Amino acid sequence: MGSLNRIYGMLLRHIYLLRGSWPRILELAYWPVMQMILWGFITQFFVGHSEWVAQAAGLLLAAVLLWDVLFRSQLGVTLPFYEELFSRNLGHLFVSPLRPWELIVSLLGISTLRTLIGVVPAALLAIPLYHYSIFDMGLPLLVFFTQLLVTGWALGLMVSGLVLRFGLGAQSLAWVAVFALAPISGIYYPISVLPGWLQPIALGLPSAHVFEGMRSVLLGQGFDTGHFLFALVLNILYLCLGAALFIRVFHVARKRGLLLHSGE
Amino acid sequence: MAIQVHELTKRFDDALAVDAMDFSVEQGSATALLGPNGAGKTTTLAMLLGLMSPTSGSIQVLGTDMLRHRYRVLGRMNYASPYIDLPQRLTVRENLNVYGHLYGVRALPKRIRQLARELDLEPLMKRAYRELSAGQRTRVALAKALINEPELLLLDEPTASLDPDTGDRIRTWLEAYRSRSGATILLASHNMPEVERLCDRVLMMRSGRIVDDGTPQGLASRYGRQNLEEVFLDVARREPAARG
């Protein structure tokens, strides 16, 4: 009960923050909606000009919506963590009985909420705007969503750990790190497009397997169990690595007194 | 004993912040760590709270080894300091609600109402923490520090930068809390009248060491001075002893 109560307390802390600011909630949904609108028009153009896109008009829209799951999920971990640093609250948190792993679980919870607030409105708007429903994908959509959510969590924990260690001067990592993955995740094109030497590196990312799997479903080739299993194993590995890095940095921060002096 | 510290040392690269410190604090007492800037007071408090790990030495808090089992005891202690803040955009009530959950407080709404009444926070409960004045923030920080009715309360300069009226109110609340609950208080302060009023024992610190120990009156008479402030100046300006 103690751990659940503390995790609930931390979730409340971030829900209060969201609830108290409509602009924050609107901003969460704004960028995914803009991305969806942009890629919707690009899709309409390519349907008439590209045989590949014409096979499945939803390829690009599904890709942009799922990419936003990864992006928002990563930001959903890092931005609430930055919020503790900006408000110089870390010292108070860690003189309470809150364990680092409980903080991690609460960050993952708030990341899920922020991701849903960001991506669901864009997915719903795509239905009247472009007559495309990502929900038609069915069960595989849930699998892709979950996998990308976990990839974002892992990356978010790594970035948060680095910012705890090196301070808010490194905060831009939240945007830099995820975009470094974009070209080799095969969001809008198959991994086979990449140079041969880059393909094994790309396939070391769970996101590359998810987007390959997504294309397989949308092009009518069925659910690819191989890509699913690769993504699953890699996600477990990276999430463990992210959590281990965060907890390791927490111990270093205690040694160096960073928890007391964290902030702007 | 509420606190027992043995050979406590903290080194940051080449700098020795706390140097093989030994002291103990009796249950139910109010003790001050007094010393000039850089004496190691805040570092000592941070190690007692588990916010900072020591380079060597041992810490027992409320009968628990803080270095091995700090989570067993953190729920029975609390801390307030002007150097760390509460979430700025949350209201006073939301902040107390969050920390009430972190400390596992039972009957939390009742406890929050009680603190709001005792610390004159009722008109502020719906206001965001960032909108409050320094004095109001200190009262909210104190409410957070008392939310779990701690057996051990650690305070870092509890009335720093407050006007005399607000400072006096805070001291009165602390005295009332201690006499009602029997809690132990350890505070770091530069405010000598505050220490003389609140504390029955003073640990004088300098360069990471405890250089003297006694009651406020006892120290003044030992140094042949009128008050603690003069004792403080004597200790702060004394040539450092050679370290072995």
Image (cartoon, rainbow, N blue to C red):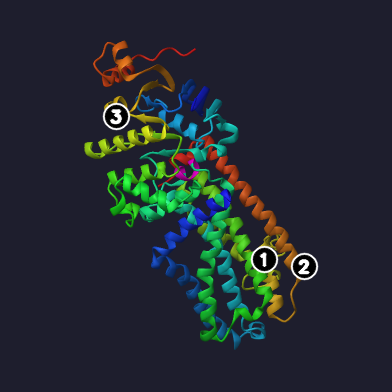
Asked whether the residues under the numbered discs 2 and 3 touch, taking CB atoms below 8 Å apart as contact, a structural biologist would say: no
> Which quadrant of the view contains residue A39?
bottom right
* Three-letter residue code for mark 3: Glu
Residue sitting at x 53%, y 79%: A124
Chain letter of mark 3 equals B
The CA span between labels 2 and 3 is 70 Å
Q: Which residue is mark 1?
A: A208
Q: Is residue B88 left or right of residue A191?
A: left
Residue sitting at x 66%, y 52%: A240
What's the magenta bit mostly, secondary-structure-wise? helix
Q: Is residue B212 above or below residue B161?
A: above
Residue toward you, A121 or A98: A98
Coordinates of residue B63 in the picture (x, y in percent): 55, 29
The image's mark for residue A226 is 2
Marks 2 & 1 on one chain: yes
Q: Which residues are the magenta region?
A: A91-95
The CA span between labels 2 and 1 is 12 Å
Q: Which residue is mark 3?
A: B194
